[in-house]
Amino acid sequence: QAKAGESYRICNCDLAPSRQRRLLEMGFLDGKEISVLNSSYAGGPLKVCLHDCRLALSATDAAGIEIESDQPVAAQLQA
């Protein structure tokens, strides 16, 4: 699970094709750095920063984004 205030690298997006295409258009590309601004509560949106833009991701979209931190273990972006 991603923690607020931490930065990660995107490894993979495993979403429905239409949602994946939308996130790719917004810059959610493999290898890009993403920062978690605050965690969601009760399945609410997750706020992240990507390319100096603040974005809110639904819990479903966040769960489909695989990330990695400085540690070698991959995680899910869901909070």
Image (cartoon, grey):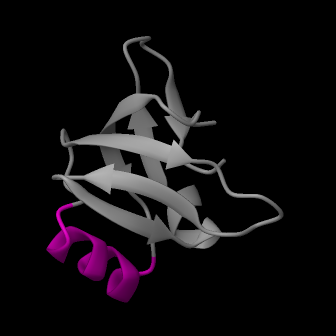
Residue drawn at the location 49% of the way across and 58% of the way down: 47
Tell whether 24 sits left or right of 8: left
24 in magenta: yes
Image location of residue 37, percent across then percent down:
48, 46
Q: Is the stretch drawn in magenta largely helix, strand or loop?
A: helix
- Residue 64 in view (yes/no): no
Residue drawn at the location 37% of the way across and 13% of the way down: 70
Image location of residue 58, percent across then percent down:
57, 73
Residue drawn at the location 46% of the way across and 69% of the way down: 56
Residue drawn at the location 36% of the way across and 32% of the way down: 8
8 in magenta: no
Q: Nearer the viewer, residue 73 or 70?
A: 70
Tell whether 7 sits left or right of 2: left
Image location of residue 68, percent across then percent down:
40, 29
The quadrant in which the N terminus is found is top right
Image location of residue 59, percent across then percent down:
63, 67
Vertical side of 36 occupied by 6: above or below: above
Vertical side of 77 occupied by 41: above or below: below
Q: Which residues are magenta?
A: 16-27
Vertical side of 46 occupied by 12: above or below: above
